[in-house]
């Protein structure tokens, strides 16, 4: 058991699923929703009808819209907020943190303004003692399936293996199995970049390019991710694991994937503003595409698939033109 209760910040699908998971494991848990009316509806309905419908909240799960109340006496604070909002929420939380609780990031993205990973944002924002208590949760998981009790495995990364083991013990159970790694950089980078590749996979399906094209794109997307990871200092084996190949395959191949769905609609001819306006969930890969382009340029790493996704999203490049540019690049050895 963790010391104190668990606080999950963010009442989207993943935050709600993780709060339910922690509560079902016997941990006193509080779920924070940003808007008071959302928190009130969750308390009254005992269901997140917007983001995770038909999943009853455990009777023991508390819900609040007060950040200070949420993290008071918490032994574990789990951030499940969109990547581009993490810094703001963390800054609001910081004054209320006491006794350096375990801090877990469940967001998958890179901050556009800085290119920072999520635990780097938390290190810069939270009280100094929290820096040694940081972990990141990632892997091939969909909130709905986890909340339904379907079997899933993921990875928790922490520079301190003891921190990773503590989070592993808190969340693991009969239907959710966690593995531990100390490659925090690799796990977070994989979780961010795979969302950009998933948009490309959706584009390929939207253009009806076929299963061969999708398989080739996923494989070459993994090559880009691994190449960028090596340049930044991540461990190559991370990209063959749950946070790398596992999450990449899931996000690129399932209709439950938010990022693949954005790409699918783009490939079918819809405009990005129209697609995003009709969503109540965040597709992290859209904004992360900006950060990946900047980080790749900073380290001199070629990421042609991610670059073409950026060009489609933000430079007005037609998807068919992007495909032609990818297929007519200079011929190379596979390892290059």
Image: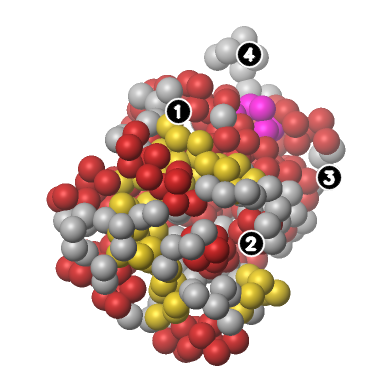
Q: Nearer the viewer, mark 2 or mark 4?
A: 2
Give the CA separation, mark 1 to mark 4. 16 Å
- Is residue 282 inside the magenta stretch? no
In the image, 211 versus 166, the foreground residue is 166
The nearer-to-camera label among 1 and 3 is: 1
The mark nearer the N terminus, 2 or 4, is 2
Disc 3 is placed on an element classified as loop
Distance CA(mark 2)–CA(mark 4): 40 Å
Asked if labels 1 and 2 touch by Cβ distance under 8 angstroms, the answer is no
Residue holding disc 4: 334
Residue 147 is marked as 2
Q: CA distance from mark 4 to mark 3?
A: 25 Å
> Residue 144, relative to residue 104: is it above or below?
below
- Residue stretch rendered in magenta on the structure: 217-222
Q: Please give the residue where the numbered disc 3 appears in the rendered image.
A: 208
Q: Quadrant of the N terminus?
A: bottom left
- Position of residue 249 measured from the top left corner of the image (x, y, whole percent): 67, 38
Q: Earlier in the sequence, mark 4 or mark 3?
A: 3
């Amino acid at each position: 058991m963790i010391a104190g209760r668990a606080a999950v910040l963010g009442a989207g699908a993943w935050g709600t699923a993780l709060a339910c998971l922690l509560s079902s494991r016997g941990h006193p848990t509080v779920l924070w929703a940003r808007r008071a009316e959302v928190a009130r509806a969750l308390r009254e309905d005992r269901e997140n009808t917007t983001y995770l419908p038909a999943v009853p909240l455990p009777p023991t799960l508390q819900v609040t819209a007060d950040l200070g109340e949420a993290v008071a006496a918490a032994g574990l604070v789990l951030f499940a907020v969109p990547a581009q909002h993490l810094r703001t929420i963390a800054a609001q939380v910081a004054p209320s943190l006491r006794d350096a609780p375990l801090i877990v990031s469940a967001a998958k993205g890179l901050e556009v303004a800085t290119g920072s990973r999520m635990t780097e944002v938390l290190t810069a924002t939270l009280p100094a003692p929290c820096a040694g208590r940081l972990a990141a949760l990632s892997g091939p998981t969909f909130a709905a399936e986890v909340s339904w009790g379907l079997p899933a495995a993921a990875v928790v990364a922490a520079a301190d293996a003891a921190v990773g083991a503590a989070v592993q013990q808190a969340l693991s159970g009969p239907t959710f199995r966690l593995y531990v790694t100390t490659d925090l950089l690799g796990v977070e980078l994989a979780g961010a970049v795979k969302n950009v590749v998933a948009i490309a996979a959706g584009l390929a399906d939207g253009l009806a390019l076929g299963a061969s094209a999708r398989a080739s794109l996923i494989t070459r997307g993994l090559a880009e991710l691994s190449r960028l990871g090596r340049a930044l200092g991540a461990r190559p084996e991370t990209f063959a694991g749950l946070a790398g190949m596992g999450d990449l395959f899931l996000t690129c191949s399932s209709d439950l994937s938010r990022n693949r769905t954005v790409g699918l609609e783009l490939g079918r001819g819809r405009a990005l503003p129209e697609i995003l306006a009709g969503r109540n969930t965040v597709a992290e890969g859209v904004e992360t595409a900006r950060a990946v382009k900047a980080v790749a340029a900073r380290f001199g790493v070629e990421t042609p698939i991610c670059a073409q996704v950026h060009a489609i999203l933000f430079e007005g490049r037609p998807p068919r033109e992007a495909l032609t540019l990818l297929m007519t690049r200079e011929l190379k050895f596979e390892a290059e």
